Image (tube, rainbow, N blue to C red):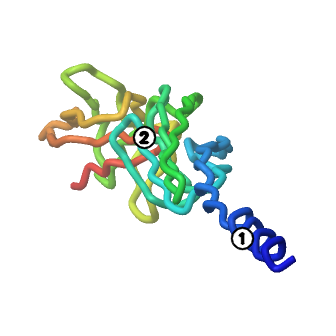
Amino acid sequence: MKKICLLFIITLLFASCKKNDPPPKPIAAFSINYQANGRVWLNNDSKNASSFQWIVSDGRTTIDQSPIIDFSNNGDYNVTLIAKGEGGTDSAVRTIQIRNLPTTGNVVFWTNFNGPYIEVFVNNQLIGTMTQYITSGGAPGCGQQGFVTVTLPQGSYSFVAKSKALIPAKWEGSITVINGQCRSMQLNK
């Protein structure tokens, strides 16, 4: 009887000594939530992971768990999520499509110079003629009558403005156009 009990205990010990299961492998997953003006929230839905790295095809990276990313240009961007955990590494790739961002901006030219008409040239092309001036207060809005508004793709441009007075005045410089913005360029006396 002692031998049977001893044999039973030894069998029980071997049966209860099993190896630990390996940790579960991570599963990288995320959803894309589009917001206004090129803003995208990447919602991390990964399982069995404790650290994350996001890589955007435009070169940006982040280790935030669920980042918000702002895009300033229309286009398609590949986003890779790398999820790491005790059980290894997994990755997921999705394409973000940014559409409907403004592709042009505006600059309004205005002056406090009380003189006759002022012609405005941008990149050596006549854009328009100012027929109004402002002596106090702020700049006019883009498109306001009597002033010259130019609409161009984002970038820097040279300008020249010339008054048609007996003693003409002349202004030269550069303007910077930013997509979706109305900016102003004051031509001072």
| Amino acid residing under circle 2 | Val
Mark 2 residue crowding within 10 angstroms, few (<14) / some (14–19) / many (20+): some
**Residue that lies at the very extreme toward the bottom in this rendered image:** 2
Name the residue that disc number 1 marks. Answer: 10
Query: Residue at image x 25%, y 27%?
Result: 121
Callout 2 secondary element: strand
* Residue 22 higher or lower than 76, as above or below: below
Callout 1 secondary element: helix
In this rendering, the count of numbered labels is 2
**Residue that lies at the very extreme toward the right in this rendered image:** 1
Q: Tell me: 161 left or right of 151.
A: left
| Amino acid residing under circle 1 | Ile
Residue 26 % position (x, y) = 59, 49
The quadrant in which the N terminus is found is bottom right
The quadrant in which the C terminus is found is bottom left
Query: CA separation, marks 1 and 2?
Result: 58 Å
